[in-house]
Amino acid sequence: MIRLALTPGEPAGIGPDLYVQIVQKAIPAEIIAVCDPALLEQRARLLKLPLRVEIFDPRAARTAAPGVIKVMPVPLEREAVPGKLDKANAPYVLETLRQAVNGCLDGTFDALVTGPVHKGVINDAGLPFTGHTEFLSELTHSAQPVMMLVSGSLRVALATTHLPLREVSAAITTARLSAVLRVLHHDLQARFDIASPRIMVCGLNPHAGEGGHLGREETEVIEPVVQQLRGEGMKLTGPLAADTLFTPKYLNDADAVLAMYHDQGLPVLKYQGFGKAVNITLGLPIIRTSVDHGTALELAGTGRGESGSLEAALRAALEMVTRCKDI
């Protein structure tokens, strides 16, 4: 049986609710929540859902049953109040990630599924944090993580992730773009079983730079990188104007799209599949999936949270683990 580590993320947010909801169902995997067990018990009471919490023993047989969740305990600094951020619990959020990642690296867990974190409160606590992607890269000593969201057959990866828009152009370098495309190509083969991935590459500027009249990143960086890697055998098309790339003309022939920055590609994907999409980090030595939404503080403890994205993230993790075990 596959064993998945789950981190609920921000304790005042929707993550703990979703985990209580999801374990009410029959899931073909052993689910281990890396968190404070009292947090899950609190949410179960608020949601009026049955929940039995068992302390995780890695030596025990792998089992799963509806209404039961195993927990690797990590204590909160202060009791979480649904909907109310508390920077005292920011170190706890990062510690759950550290312990879950360490468990993936040492083979205790087969994959990691993460709930939403609140970057602002972590930074308010004086802890530098730009997002899961970058933090997991540090923990696993990975040179080039790649953030990719998936909704149905649409896969959108990012050349840059959580950067202010004014910093994006300088970050689109030959070295970065080459590394991102190599990771994307490799993981589409290794984790999605796509033998010869077809990747559409966005330009950075409107109309993909209009031949240099609206910016030179396309002619000086993106196009040369695409040509070089195409010469190595990759099936790359671009740079293409982002305003027309996300149409059937291109997407019907694409296994993935590489957008240059966060809000270039993700609005399209989230419009298509918000609440059902999955965030996947490529370029790591571990398998990590996540929900496609934020902490939804206003929904925490109300029972109005939807677990569709978490279910999709669990399913994606199980599929990738199974695929890797079959290779």
Image (cartoon, grey):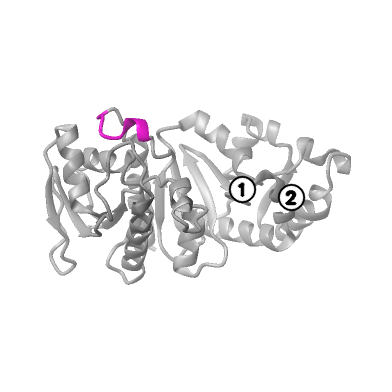
Give the residue drawn at x 73%, y 44%: 204
Residue type at tag 1: Arg
Q: What stretch is highlighted in magenta?
A: 297-303
Relative to 99, is 246 on the left or the right? right
Residue tagged by mark 2? Answer: 169
Q: Earlier in the sequence, mark 2 or mark 1?
A: 2
Near mark 1 (Cα within 10 A), the count class, few <14, some 14-19 or many ≥20, is some
Picture quadrant of residue 230: bottom right
The quarter of the rendered structure image containing the C terminus is bottom left
Residue type at tag 2: Ser
Relative to 312, is 219 on the left or the right? right
Residue tagged by mark 1? Answer: 198
Name the secondary structure under disc 1. Answer: strand
Residue 154 in percent (x, y) is at: 52, 38
Task: Say if residue 76 shows up in the picture.
Answer: yes
Give the residue drawn at x 34%, y 61%: 95
